[in-house]
Amino acid sequence: MTRELPTGWYTDEELAYLLSALRRRQPRVIVEVGSLFGRSALAIAQAMRPTAHLLCVDIWPDERVFNAFTYAVEQAGLSERVTPQHMSSIEAASVWQSKIANQKSKIDLLHLDGDHRSLGVYLDIREWLPCLAPDGLFIGHDWGLDSVQFGVMQARAEGLLREVGVSDVQRHGKPALWWGLPGTTGT
Ligand SMILES: C[S@@+](CC[C@H](N)C(=O)[O-])C[C@H]1O[C@@H](n2cnc3c(N)ncnc32)[C@H](O)[C@@H]1O
């Protein structure tokens, strides 16, 4: 890591996996769902190319956590390139969908680390899918949770994801992250 990151749920090894996907793809438009104090967000923002932009979506139920997030972004000098969106993932996806007609580009990389319940994971994939570029990538944390696996596999079963894979990086003996290539929206 180039500089100290806020506290959070990502280990350094897991972040390295996330950042290797980022560096391979060189995304221009990145969305993160579930930012908390900004650990993964700042890691992404420090590694993304200079012209890229990161939108961070979180419900931030505790205002102090939101303030800590914005402070960390400011201290890192990244306020111009990281935009917090203080709302639920589904609301943010709907805002994005309504703007999409006028948007030149879709999302290249969508990092999912928000609602880890199976329905939440499934809905995140379903609702953000229309906003993702056809060659975009979903990458999500906590594959080791059954609920995350159920949500992802439900989306896979419905064709919302055309391919799913998991990281070699492990946590408690299970892959720590998953990735998915966008399928069809069914619309
Ligand atoms: C595991 S933490 C994220 C950890 C963070 N990525 C890190 O690097 O430490 C999950 C976050 O998702 C947020 N969250 C949970 N459900 C959400 C939802 N439906 N929409 C947006 N954010 C949500 C929570 O407020 C919390 O900050």
Image (cartoon, rainbow, N blue to C red):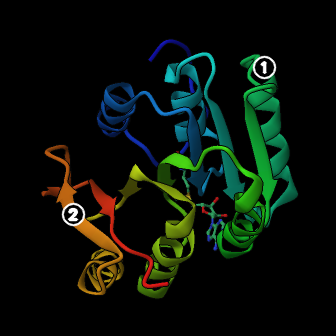
- Image-quarter location of ligand 1: bottom right
Identify the residue shown where x is 72% and y is 61%: 101
Q: Amino acid at mark 2?
A: Val
Identify the residue shown where x is 30% and y is 58%: 181
Of residues 157 and 151, which is closer to you in this image?
157
Identify the residue shown where x is 78% and y is 66%: 87
Q: Amino acid at mark 1?
A: Gln
Left or right: 50 as drawn, with respect to 11: right
Of residues 123 and 25, which is closer to you in this image?
25
On whether ligand 1 comes within 8 Å of the CB at mark 1, the answer is: no
Is 51 above or below relative to 63? Answer: above
Label 1: which residue? 75
Q: Quadrant of the N terminus?
A: top left
* Marks 2/1: CA–CA distance: 36 Å
- The image position of residue 82, as x and y in percent, is 72, 34
| Among the 4 quarters of the image, the one containing residue 153 | bottom left
- The image position of residue 10, as x and y in percent, is 43, 44
Q: Which circle's residue, 2 or 1, is located before the other in the chain? A: 1
Left or right: 93 as drawn, with respect to 66: left
Of residues 70 and 155, which is closer to you in this image?
155
**Total labels drawn:** 2
Label 2: which residue? 164
- The image position of residue 106, as x and y in percent, is 58, 50
